[in-house]
Amino acid sequence: MRKGIHPEYRPVVFRDRAADYAFFTRSTMTSERTIEWEDGRTYPVVDVEISNVSHPFYTGTARVLDTAGRVERFERRYGKGGGA
């Protein structure tokens, strides 16, 4: 790698506020806020909207939309076709 052109790669804590979950990793993300981690050291913390702990795909709480049923109900209600 060329020197001086890449952002600093450092330890960072990512915190999912919706699930009250945090994980420690390395990243180039920056933050003004800090948090004291389990090892007693202080690290920058980046708040995220969603992570694998709160995402419906990973938690199994995803809802499958019944589009075929909706189309059938619409056709029953308003009739098929609709020519002018």
Image (spheres, helix red, strand yellow):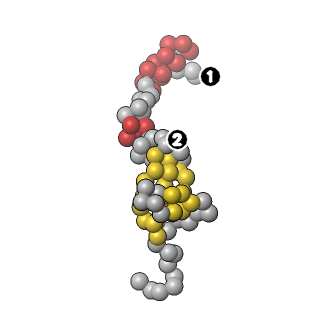
Number of other residues with Cα within 10 Å of mark 1, as a class: few under 14, some 14 to 19, many 20 or more? few
The x and y percentages for residue 8 are 50, 75
* Tally of numbered discs: 2
- Say which quadrant the N terminus sits in: bottom left
For the residue pair 23 and 71, the one nearer the viewer reads as: 23
In the picture, residue 44 is in which quadrant?
A: bottom right
The x and y percentages for residue 72 are 46, 18
Point 48% across, 22% down: residue: 70
Q: Is residue 83 visible?
A: yes
Residue occupying the far bottom of the picture: 3
The x and y percentages for residue 49 are 54, 47
Query: Alpha carbon of mark 1 to alpha carbon of mark 2: how far?
Result: 50 Å
Number of other residues with Cα within 10 Å of mark 2, as a class: few under 14, some 14 to 19, many 20 or more? some
- Say which quadrant the C terminus sits in: top right
Point 43% across, 37% down: residue: 56
> Which circle marks residue 24 in the picture?
none
Q: Amino acid at mark 2?
A: Ala
In the picture, residue 32 is in which quadrant?
A: bottom right
The x and y percentages for residue 35 are 53, 57
> Which circle marks residue 84 in the picture?
1
Q: Classify 15 as above or below 58.
A: below
First in sequence, mark 1 or 2: give its number.
2
Residue where numbered disc 2 is placed = 18
For the residue pair 76 and 42, the one nearer the viewer reads as: 42
